[in-house]
Image (tube, grey):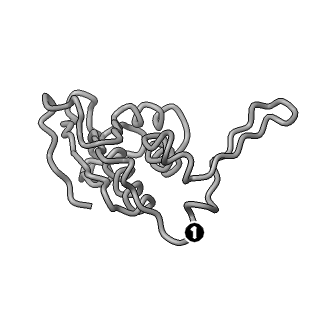
Amino acid sequence: MHKTYIPKKEEVKRTWYLVDAKDKILGRLASKIAVILRGKHKPEFTPHLDTGDGVIVINAAKIKVTGKKLEDKLYRRYSGYPSGLKEIPLKTMLKNRPTKVVELAVKRMLPSGPLSRKILKKLKVYKDDRHPHKAQNPISLKV
């Protein structure tokens, strides 16, 4: 009988990856980032533990989408009050808050719950090609 290996919190080795989002398709990029954040690319992946790596995304403002999503895709938030529904098209979101577009795409590809919120803290998104994470020695990742 074999015992299943469960990594301890101290044993998990974290690596940081640098992803250039310039001219990348939003959904495909977000799914790759979600896999890395969750740790599914590692052999010691455990569903109930945070075994993933950190991801730094640069050039979020230069992301691409296919079809008519720029006009048709809506980001909705509801305050809970009457007439409290706000709908913002993707085009406006990319202009005003390009980092939020990538963050939301990745967030919605992760399972919801406390673990997901912890995992999302390892995602850093920047609208241009500058970032303050030189000390993490990020490895460039081709997506």
**Looking at the image, is 134 positioned above or below residue 108?**
above
Give the amino acid at mark 1.
Lys
Is 26 left, or right, of 133 in this rendering?
right
Residue drawn where x is 85% and y is 36% of the image? 83
Residue picked out by circle 1:
68
Tell me the crowding category of disc 1: few under 14, some 14 to 19, or many 20 or more residues within 10 angstroms, Cα based: few
Q: Secondary structure at mark 1?
A: loop
Q: State the image coordinates of residue 59 (x, y, percent, origin top left).
A: 31, 47
Q: Residue 138's quadrant in the figure? A: top left
> Residue 41 or 83: which is nearer the viewer?
83
Q: How many marks?
A: 1
- In the rendered structure, the answer to whether residue 19 lies left or right of residue 104 reads left
Residue at image point 35% right, 41% down: 127
Q: Quadrant of the C terminus?
A: bottom left
x and y percentages locating residue 114 in the rendered image: 51, 31
In the visual, does 115 lie left or right of 17? right
Instruction: Name the residue: 53% across, 72% down.
Output: 67
Kindly give the residue lying farthest to the bottom in the view shown: 67
Expressed as whole percent of the image width and height from the top left, the position of residue 129 reads 24, 43
* 92 or 1, nearer to the observer: 92
